[in-house]
Every structure is written in C-alpha cells, then in structure tokens.
Image (cartoon, rainbow, N blue to C red):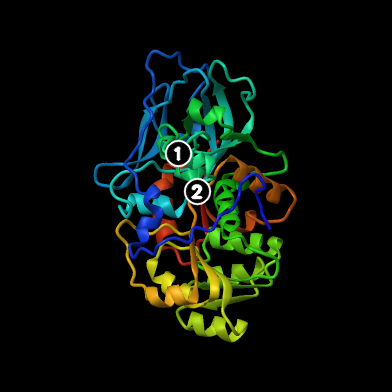
Amino acid sequence: MNLTESLVPRVLDTGIRTTVSDYYSWLIYPSYRINSNPETTHPPFSIGNSLNRRARQEQSMLACLINGQRQAEITDVPVPRLQPGEVLIKLAAAGICGTDIEKVHGAYGPGGILGHEVSGTIASVGDDVTDLRKSDRVIAHHHVPCYNCHYCQQGDHTMCDLFRKTNFDPCGLAEYFRVPETNVTRGAVTRLPSEASFEEGSMIEPTACCVRALNKAEVKQGDSVLVVGLGPTGLTKIQLLRKMGASTIVGADLLPKRLEMARKLGASEAIDSSSKDIPEYVTKLTHVGVDLAIVSTGNPKAIQPALASVRKGGKLLLFGAPAQGSSIGLDVSALFSRQISIVTSYSCVESDIHSALGFLTRGDIDLRSMVTDRFVLRDAPNAIGHARTSRTAVKTMIVSES
C-alpha cells in the first residue's frame, strides 16, 4: 500500500557498507545560514512580547542557537528581513527532534541549525507572495528539492543537491523565522487545517518522514513488522503500519513509558529490549522472522538485533540517523545468502507532508497523545537536555509564550 501516490517507492538493494553513517551522509552537513538583506524594508508589525520579562531591543527576538562551545544558547538576534517571495512566520510550536539533540552534542560534527518541526502564524509576506496571507496558520518545511535534477527525476528528492542547502533563518527555534523564496515557491509553507492544533501541526514533518520511509519499504497488507526504538517516530510508524494493514507489529524499547504508549497506539506486542532477546522473541512469535524490521533509533547497537529478526528475503529499514563515523560489523555472507534488502530513508518532501496531513485530519493517527512535555522558547536549551535524558519524555515541545 502506497501512502503517497505521487512518489514511486523503491528498495535500494545495493552493496553493503559497514559504516552506518554512509547510509545517512546527507544528514551530515555544515552549518548553513541564509543572510538577511539589510537593504530590505522591515516587515510592518510590532515585535514586543510582555512575557519575555526582560529588556528587549526593538526589532529583536529570541532564538536558540548553537554557540562556539557547541551548547544551545538563547540569544537576542534581529528579526529577519524579507525579500520578495519570502514569508516570515511567528512560531507557535516546535518539536524537539533527535537530530536537534545530536547537533548540540556534536554527533553530526560541529554546528547545525536547530528546529525544523514547526508550526505558527504568518506575520508578514514579501512581495510576489500571492497564495499566502498574514495571519494564516501554517506549517513549514525547512528543506526542499529542485524537482528537476537527475536525483529528483528518479524520485530521490532528498538526495537533491539543493535539498540540504535550504533552511530557515535564523532557525526554527526562534520567535520568528524566515522561510526563503526557494522553499515558498516549492510549496513548503502549507496551511494548517482548522481542526488541527499547532502542536499537531509541528508533528506533521516527522510524520511525513515516516510516510516516506514506509513507502520506500513497500509495506504490504498482512506484513509482520518489528519497530526498534519507540520514540515519537517509532510510535507514529506503529500507527501508520496499522492503517497499511500490517498483521503483526512488534515494538521494542528500553523505556517502560514508551512501551506502554506503543501498546495503546496499536502495537501487537511491546517488549523490553533490556530483558528480552529480540530475535528469539520475534522468531518464536512469527516462526520465520518478520517481513520488515525498522530501526527507528540512531543507536547503531539496534541494527544487529533488528537484522537478526528479519526472515529470509525480508527487509531492514534504517530510519534513525546514526552519529557521524558510526560503524557495525556485518556477516556479509549471511546477508547475501538470506537475501535481505537494506533500505534507508531520510527526511520528506511536500507530497509526504500532504499525505501526513490527510492521516491527521481523517483521525487515522493520534499525534496529540505523544506530547508529554512542554517548554517555552526561553527554556529551549533545557528542553533539549530534557528530551535527551528523561526516561518518561516521549515528545518534548517548545510552545509560544503569546
């Protein structure tokens, strides 16, 4: 079953590499910042926020940036100025992604722009923007492909050279952020349905990443699936797999809170991987192994038990992004003789965003219940630390103070 009809899912069954991060090389990129144009007139609105409780310079705002010591830091920065074709969004909600945590702690290398799971209200639009209006409730996607290059023509949109060069200014964890014309013209700013909350809207981007990944894995009606790693994307996949008709869905994690939530959201079984042997448990349950095992965590230690749980001729989907330089040992002979396909998936594009919105508005998925913790923007560094260390957090959210 294909969740996004406009994309043709393909299984990449190529040569096996032992460096895990090779599969995700597009996630490892230097810090990129789009500079404001000082000659552009500042958008006509007031920036003041009485809840900030400290003196603020006119036309400045709070943003969470990575400083020279590789720490997340709240600082005052200028409100971005708009050029033609651009949009300025006032942040309402932003989810903390695992990649935000890794950027702060240097696992992807130094630098990086924080915050991409965002929703908010349009504060101002630049000249030549005709289909979006001030005060529209929207979600925005930080990366877009060109849709014209060889990769895009082959359906590998997230491999496009343009894709990783596009981003928000100054970041998504800011009171206001600028969406560049390149993104706006490619449909990366989407109106949020009236029935959806801002928090749900901020979770559409990771949901869309799950949609794209499951399309690439070509999940079929009746498939048995193992999901290792029950963070927000693992739990979202469990819900999507149910809608796709998977017959048996096994979730595995170390944390009781996440195992409990997996059962509530549709997992057939949820097992504690610290106390149970995953391949042994899965084989006993399915007799032959699962049709598809999904690694929904960046911890490379999860790959081996997932791979050992796959039936002959099955598939392994790598979804969680590993740290730069991560590697594993593989019995390539066994991989070859068992004919297991390894599929990887990174990020999403606009068609996936619209598919994810469809699942939300039809009531097919429950995103709201995964939000366990909320912080205001000024506490974003603490939110990132909490998401990293808490044993009870599932989705940590940054919410607007106004």
In the picture, the disc for residue 163 is 1
Task: State whether residue 251 is above or below residue 397.
Answer: below
The residue lying furthest to the left in this view is 69
Tell me residue 236's x, y (percent): 60, 59
The amino acid marked with disc number 2 is Ser
Task: State whether residue 200 is above or below residue 293.
Answer: above
In the rendered image, which residue does mark 2 sit on?
347
Tell me residue 110's x, y (percent): 28, 47
Q: What's the residue at 45%, 39% (across, down)?
A: 163
The amino acid marked with disc number 1 is Phe
Decide if residue 391 is on the left or right side of residue 265.
left
Q: Are marks 1 and 2 in contact (CB under 8 Å)?
A: yes
| Element carrying mark 2 | loop
Task: In this rendered view, identify the residue nearer to me: 396 or 163.
Answer: 163
The residue lying furthest to the front in this view is 337
Decide if residue 203 is on the left or right side of residue 37.
right
Task: State whether residue 339 is above or below residue 81.
Answer: below
